[in-house]
Amino acid sequence: MTLLKILTYPDPFLREPTKPVADIDDEIQTIIEDMAETMYEAPGVGLAAIQAGIDKSIIVYDPDADVEKKDFHVLINPEIVFSEGEMVSENEGCLSVPDLRADVKRSEKVTVEALDRNGNPLKIEAVGLLSVILQHEIDHLKGILFIDRISALKRQLYKKKRRKALKSEPTV
Ligand code: GNR
Ligand code: NI
């Protein structure tokens, strides 16, 4: 198992659209295991492959984020096929957007279709935290970050803060 490096804003790779997985082969299984390990280590409740520099349509998530159980879920080629309602996800954060928590307007309920890691089709109807995680991760697969969904003013302030932080970061 390998820990993957999580890319952070403004890495342009985070804006790349991802490619659907055609064959769920051993290489994909290895990527899934490495993504899960990376998510627990971070720690986070979800991770999209693009955050680890892999432009494939794969997400892993675990709303409990319980590193003891490591009972994670895998979605391959996920799509939101239905959504309804509106909610505000309070204090949303992203491993690829360091040092920012913000309220984000999301759909209240989503229906997601995907393949599991064995290639079997599945359908999830989600509300609450799971609905937010799925919307957040599926956004990543389209090159969308949660800062794209906050007010322009907050986004500008974050960009400025991030530029400053990166400038003063010591070079290794
Ligand atoms: O760990 C994470 N926490 C979180 C909290 C609220 C809404 C979404 C998330 S996802 C995030 C991990 C991450 O960046 N996944 O892409
Ligand atoms: Ni994220």
Image: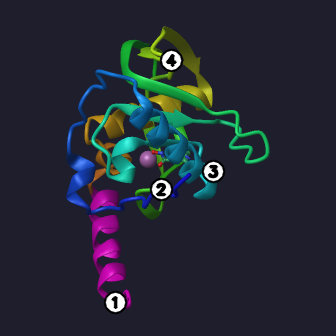
Element carrying mark 1: loop
Q: Earlier in the sequence, mark 4 or mark 1?
A: 4
Cα distance in 3D space between marks 3 and 1: 27 Å
Q: How many marks?
A: 4
Q: Are marks 2 and 1 in contact (CB under 8 Å)?
A: no
What secondary structure is found at the residue carrying circle 4?
A: loop
User: Any magenta on residue 171?
Assistant: yes
CA separation, marks 2 and 1? 21 Å
Disc 2 residue: CB within 8 Å of ligand 1: yes
- C-beta proximity under 8 Å, tags 2 and 4: no
Question: What residue did someone put label 4 on?
Answer: 118
Q: What span is colored magenta in the figure? A: 153-172
Residue topped by disc 1: 171
Tell me which label, 2 or 3, sits earlier in the chain: 3
Q: Position of residue 37 (x, y in %)?
A: 59, 49
Left or right for 170, reference 110 = left
Label 2 and label 4: CA atoms lie apart by: 27 Å
118 relative to 78 in the view: left or right:
right
- Of the numbered discs in the image, which one, if any, rests on residue 55? none
Mark 3 and mark 4 lie on one chain; the one further toward the N terminus is 3
Q: Is mark 1 within 8 Å of ligand 1?
A: no
Q: Earlier in the sequence, mark 2 or mark 1?
A: 2
Q: Which mark is nearer the camera, 3 or 4?
A: 4
Label 2 or label 4, whichever lies nearer to me, is 4
Separation of residues labelled 2 and 3 (CA atoms):
12 Å
Q: Where in the figure is residue 129, as x and y percent of width and height?
A: 60, 32
Which amino acid type is marked by label 4?
Asn
* On screen, residue 72 above or below 112: below
Kind of residue sitting beneath label 1: Thr
- On the image, numbered disc 2 is attached to which residue? 95
